[in-house]
Image: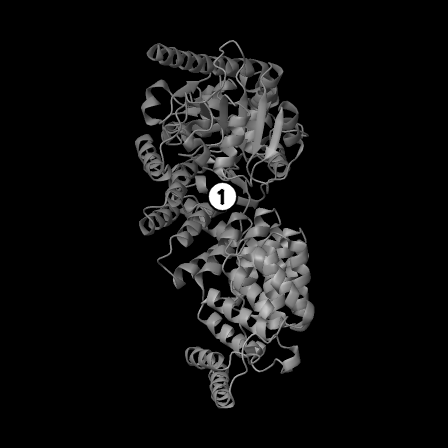
Amino acid sequence: MAETPGFFQPPTYRAQARMELGAVRPVTPAARNEVVAPTPPAQLARARKQYARGVEHARADRWREALRFFEEAARCAPDQPNYHYVHGVALCRHDRFDEAIGAFQLELEVTPEHAPSLTEIGTCLARTGRTRQGIPFLQRGLARIPHLPLAQFSLGLALLTERRPKEAIIALSSALTYDGAYADAYRMRGLALTMEGEHDKAVDDLQAAAALDSKNHRALLDLGISLGANAREQQAARLFEMAAKVAPDIALPQYVYGNFLINHRFFEAGLRYVDRAIELDPLQAEPYVGRGFGLLGQGRIDEAVAAYRRAGELKPESAQIAGTLLFALQHYPGVTKQDLLEAHKRWAALYRPTAPRDKLAFSNDPDPTRKPRLGIVSADMHRHAAAFLTLRAFEQLAALGYEIFCYKTDRKREDDDFSERFKAAGKFWRDVSDLDDAALAALVEEHKIDILFDLAGHTAGNRLSVFAQRAAPIQLSWAGYVGTIGLDTYDGVIADPVEIPPQDDEFYAEPVIRLPDCYVCYHPPTNTPEVGPLPALEKGAITFGCFNRPAKINSEVGRAWARIIEQVPDSRILMVYGGLNESATQKALYDVLEKGGLSREHVELVGGAEQPILLDAYANRVDLALDPFPYSGGVTTLEAMWMGVPTVTFVGDTFAGRHSATHLTAAGLAEFCTYSIDDYVALAVDWAKRPQDLAALRAGLRDKVAASPLNDQVRFGQNLSNELSRLWTQWCDRRRARDAAGAGAAA
């Protein structure tokens, strides 16, 4: 945020404040501290003329001239009240704050406890980073004359800088009592209320600020970002929308609101705002990134990749922007393993500013007979796809005696029953969203973590920067990303022989760790409907299903599906996913499919991403699932099998292209894996023409999956434990060898 503690900014000098020029009542000689000789009459007359001319220039906002006349007036008549004060005010207008403090102090010698001078000294101190010193001066002045809204605002701002939000709210409320149209006071009180957790009141204040000052869009954005980071999505949405409306010709608020909408799967509306931002400022990279995400959500992969690449051209030095392209490339038809490796290495070269820590430099006890201590870094330790693939494994590792420490990296993700199970399996749980990289790495080291798991990779909520600097002796990538991370600080990416065949090791920056069955341990959905009879037996026609995100659909997929539909009379394809209820998103996806020759008449699009909706559709509407390519289904394929629906897959060359293949193989359904588009089409048509065989498979498929290695957490846990022990023993051997060599050299 632009203005967070310490963020003291100069208060806005508005016309109605009038700088208190001429507003101080004359002080009688008896009330003065007579430290200087009285000014001779002739000199006093000259001083009064200089003062009057200074006031005239100040009121006309000609502060250069005003300073010259006020300085001369104070020099000629240093004993006169108000002269040093206005001289100080003029110095403030030129940011000469230390000189201004001196002038105000001279005024206090002439007029003891002169309230405006006290408040100005406090403001000057705060504006020069000395807020703690400035607060008492502001309080002394306001105790004498409280009706100074500008000073009340300065006090509130100073208190907020010192992280005293309760007191700041009182001062800012006083400013608004004396000036109900003080937009900046509403703005800063909104921030103070946010710090106190009064989010709804904060939004009301920001609405008032926006109504009073249409230039206040930045404050709306700042508070909206703060609220969004604290899982106050509804209030954040209101603020972002307000900012976009009050500043329709400024790119930043258009981009921020559009990106917010896209992140919440309102792709059509979000793209309108993002495109407006690009129209207003076509040389800013970030709106192109937002556009890429929006297009990806609509399945417009070619345009999405082009948008990400344009962002990279505008900011070639940005690792963050280079990273946004990586996930999109996984969906790109024709992308190769070499393409992906090179793109990830380009990102890595930008990303890591310094050399990582030596993996042998940690003080962990190198005892290979003890179980290594495990850490999990993830934003997804709740009912998320990554948790459905890893939770049971960690529970089994805990049962085997491993100590597990959980580091949650995104407070916006609400804890649920899966979160509670991670907590129960772990020895430690903490939301580390507010910790910077150094603090998180220090916490991991304090806990003596031996093996640190990254369950995010290049996805939302990641802490790649911590892994890049190396936070533990052994670091592993698992289940959260689709392939190489690109960094050489990972000691392994967990896979299996299907997911990463042995001949593909060269396309990974990390060593490949192959588990013998499957690289994940599936947690079936809970409270699932029973597997019913094959819908086609009642309807008389086959319904194919694909519940993957639109980004995985491309014209090549559409072409293959069109060939299947042509050979299976009266068949249809049902697609269910979040965002598909938007008309523009529907049109975009239909256009992609029609480019491949598949008419929209044969496709039904349903918006919905909640697991119960998907499971119900599998149970009652889908006979056979069709996998997209080159990015295949993961949990979608597993859920389909659990509901009795096998998936026909075209096995790709990349990690993302082989998810379904590894799951089907582990479940004993390797015959549903094909290795050419022709075979993919032929296999789908063959099964569609054998509904009785499909019905028989459906009836026993859940039991088949339940009895397979996919669902055997004891077997999986032991397989994973074996690999962890191997890695730990290797590290211990290397550490002890290094220590022995060092001891020998010292001797």
Nearest the eye: 118 or 58: 118
Give, as a three-letter code, the residue at label 1.
Answer: His
Q: Residue 692's x, y, as percent?
A: 56, 24
**Which residue corresponds to mark 1?**
602
Q: Left of 743 or right of it: where is 212?
A: right
Q: Position of residue 288 (x, y in %)?
A: 40, 52
Left of 499 or right of it: where is 161?
right
Q: In the rendered picture of this protein, how many numbered marks are placed on residues?
A: 1
Give the camera-side residue of 513 and 152: 152
Q: Residue at x 40, y 21 (%)?
A: 512
- Residue at x-position 42% and y-position 12%: 736
Q: Is residue 145 left or right of residue 187?
A: right
Residue 340 visible (yes or no): yes
Give the x, y percent position of residue 32.
Answer: 62, 77
Note whether 397 is above or below 350 in the view shown.
above
Q: Is residue 696 visible?
A: no
- Residue farthest to the front? 37
* Residue 48 horizontal/vertical position (percent): 51, 87
Does dot 1 land on a helix, a strand or a loop? helix
Work out whether 258 lies above or below 673: below
User: Looking at the image, what colour scheme do you see?
Assistant: one colour
Q: Quadrant of the C terminus?
A: top left
Q: Residues within 10 Å of mark 1 (few under 14, many from 20)?
A: some
400 w.r.t. 235: above or below: above
Q: For residue 16, what is the image quadrant?
A: bottom right
